[in-house]
Amino acid sequence: MPSETPDLTRRGFRNVDAATAHLADLGEVDPGLVERIATVASPDTALASLAAIARSLGADVLRERLTDPELRERLLVVLGTSEAMGDFLVRHPEMLGELAGDQLDLHRRDADAMRAELAEATDAAELRVTYYRQLLCTIARDLNAYSTFRETSSELSDLAVATLEAALGIARSQEDDADLVRLAIIAMGKTGGHELNYISDVDVIFVHETADGADEQKALRAATRLASAVMRICSEPTSEGTIWEVDANLRPEGANGPLTRTVGSHVAYYERWATTWEFQALLKARFAAGDAELGREYLAAVQPMVWEASTRENFVTDTRAMRRRVLDHIPAAHRDRQLKLGSGGLRDVEFAVQLLQLVHGRGDEALRSPTTLDALEALTEGGYVGRRDGAALEEAYEFLRTLEHRIQLFRLRRSHIVPDDEEDLSRIGRSMGFRVSPAENLVSEWQSHRRIVRRLHEKLFYQPLLEAVASLPTEDIRLTPEAARERLVALGFRDPKGALAHLEALTSGVSRRKAIHRALLPAMLAWFSEAPDSDAGLLAFRSISESLGESHWYLRKLRDEGEGAEQLARLLSSSKYVSDLMMRNPDAVALLGDDAELVPRDVERIHTEMALAAKRHARDAKAAVRAIRRIRRRELSRVAIADVLGRLDIVTVGHALSDLNTATVSAALTAATRAIEDERGEMPTAMAVVLMGRLGGRESGYGSDADVMFVHQPLPGADEKAASQAATAVATRLREMLQAAGDDPPLEVDADLRPEGRNGPLVRSFASYEAYYAKWSAVWEAQALLRASPVVGDPDLCARFRTLIDPLRYPEGGLDESAVREIRRIKARVESERLPRGANPTTHLKLGRGGIADVEWTVQLLQMCHGHEVEGLRTTDTLAALHAAASAGIVDSGDAAILEEAWRLVSRIRNGVVLMRAKPAESMVEQAAEKAGLAHLLGYRQDEGERMVDDYLRITRQARAVIERVFWGEPDPE
């Protein structure tokens, strides 16, 4: 039909040659038929299927059938949307009559009628034919708008249940011992909820009881064979294809548990072992097939447990973990096109509704529907969800489910991925009523509904809580105080009464700040609830908001910078250390939401700012140091915020904190010197501060002191005693001013690593250091000097001091055997005497086996033995020295990697504990709540506290084995 070619192109057929051939198969057709085919979702698919049916049935017979206008309309719509149903009709053209005007029931089929019809099937192939005949009618009603989405999904569920009943009947007819056992099939998931897809696994649980007088073991084996046969009959391929998979993995113990259990066995499991997700799954349970009385007995036994799930100890942890597991299992390539599991997808709606049911259904039986949309309506009617939010969520859910149906219908294959092919999108869009730019408009509408779901997923939980404490509720939300407290507890708040008080204080009133709080808090409460300490986060937020009052920049940041508000919520509910810094200085909130503000400043920039701030208070040393400490507090906030948000690694944190403390000591030295000069006159000596310990190694933590030594050099002609007194006065004043209590965190300046420790003078002259090291210096003091960094104060004095100590810490020729033995003796003494009484040597973070001290002593021994010949070892940085030792072949690279991993992990744990609770810990945390909080800060999930501890024990154990060889010189065990 060449003359038709231009018309076919204009009418929207993509493959004109194929369409021309298909029209030839149909013979002489009414031109109106071609026009009508051109309007369906996929004209090419519809025409191809119609031609195939003509070849199967006969073109003349088909044309006769198509004279029925209702049959023709229904058929073309089905064929244009579902290639799979076209294939079915090619195999069974006699089924066309099901679509006739006087044949198709325009209302959904009665469930009992379906059961009766499917029960007539005697084998799997016959069952499939009957199933697909019923499915054809369901699809026709759906696509021709005779039934709503709810009616369609409910009808699909009834069809699945009827199929299970028929499959069980076939199985029983083939099982010799069928009479030994009563078997019931419990529908779960979407089948149980009367909301099934076109193609989906049908989730079930099997329950059985032994028939009177029968042997229990024989009955169990018979029940297992029956259950297996039902699954096989529904899923195995036949000449008529397959139906769907029957999935019994929601049963107790999942795939590892017995396929069927008695009611008593089910109850025993749920009472003792079940987790929250299993009770959530039972929310959908209903009787499907088999022994109805047994099904009712099972449901009566287990369903009351569902409504007690929200009172279980791990309810909040479990629900968070369930949602995370869903998101974690989405392949990255599909994340943006996942209709079911992705953000703003179907699971967000279903999860939110089910969680609200579990929380409030305990006291309100009206909320216990297994059907998502019915439950959402009940939540709305009960005042647990706002009416506008409920209506918007219902509309979005119906759209997403309808889109899911249309995706699956084409080939009747299970899929939840929105295609990216233009032709597929156009077909689906047309099937959903988008006639103009169907692909573009479909995607636009889908993304719009995703945004609605994402927004309402947060608001659904939290907006009613705000309305519950508002003096003038804006919606028909009627949460009672008790219901509000229940919801807060379920969302992770341990003090719901206090949380409600904070919400009331934050939102009650008509000020601009209160209005912004009301708009923002639903999202912020969601962020609080995902972190370890929701209560502390909300309290800190209230405190900061009250401190900043009506500050325009703060309100603007909250209102306009979503990332900044989210960061604030996560910080306040994860880190007491950061919360304390922010409550002392709420202006730190200004750092949030700007990546450039969360980069640590270098030491020169900080020192310059501190020096200028101190200079403005040149005649008031205390005021000058207060200005210095304010800058330090701000920079501590910057580093800690970036750290908690996962922007910094442990080495960068150590460098940043050390540089900050170095600048602070340097600026304070200038201020203290100026103060003493005001009191005594011009300084008669030059001063320097030697940084020691972790500060000298640029490895400071949040709980670290500033270990230092003070050195001075009298000026030519100066009185040595007067010079010593002036230098001591400066050092004393510096320590007093930095350690003084105040609004800003103090910096403890510890000079105990000086010669003779606390028994020696606080400050020594360079000559005194020179004489001491020449005569008295012990090997442990040389070891301590490995971390010495003379960088603060008089540059010439710093350089001379470095020249003085280098031969001590990197001795020519390395250490002799006696010095090595002495270091090992001291290390053994430290392990036996300094470990606190009762401390576990495997979990003490500093002194424990494979901990910080183990790694650092090992590296320091290598530095003292080989530093004279390997330049890279002449550093105060532990990891840099370790890398140099590995590069020089002094230590095996694999061993070095193990030591580095241990050092990094333990250092992160020590910092993490301080960030979490604002005070240090000697050992690994033990309480479950602290494990969860620390795990969260270290990048684990909150429910992975035990995994974190196991990793720590494994890594430090491996490090200790290396240390036994490298430090102690012990051979590998054979």
Image (tube, rainbow, N blue to C red):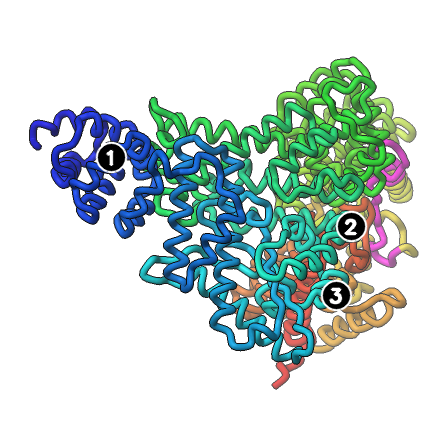
Residue type (three-letter) at the residue carrying disc 1: Leu
Q: Is residue 362 visible?
A: yes
Q: Which mark is residue 66?
A: 1
The label on residue 308 is 2
Q: Is residue 888 left or right of residue 15?
A: right
Q: Amino acid at mark 3?
A: Ala
**Kind of residue at disc 2:** Glu
| Nearest to the observer: residue 280 or residue 580 | 280
Left or right: 531, with 336 as reference point: right
Decide whether the magenta segment is chiefly helix, strand or loop.
Answer: loop
Disc number for residue 720: none
Q: Earlier in the sequence, mark 2 or mark 1?
A: 1
In this picture, is 295 found above or below 636? below
The answer to whether mark 3 and mark 2 are in CB contact below 8 A is no
Question: Residue at the spot x=23%, y=40% of the render?
Answer: 50
Q: Which residues are the magenta region?
A: 733-757
Q: Residue at x 84, y 49 (%)?
A: 750
Q: Which is more N-terminal, label 2 or label 3?
A: 3
Instruction: Determine which quarter of the picture holds residue 783.
Output: bottom right
Mark 1 surroundings within 10 Å by alpha-carbon count, few (fewer than 14), some (14 through 19), many (20 or more): many
The reply to whether residue 256 is visible in this rendering is no
| Residue named by callout 3 | 268
Residue 749 colored in magenta in the image: yes
Badge 3 marks a residue whose secondary structure is helix
Residue 608 rendering spot, x and y as whole percentages: 68, 29
User: Residue lying farthest front?
Assistant: 102
Residue 418 position in % (x across, y down) = 42, 39
Name the foreground residue: 598 vs 351: 351
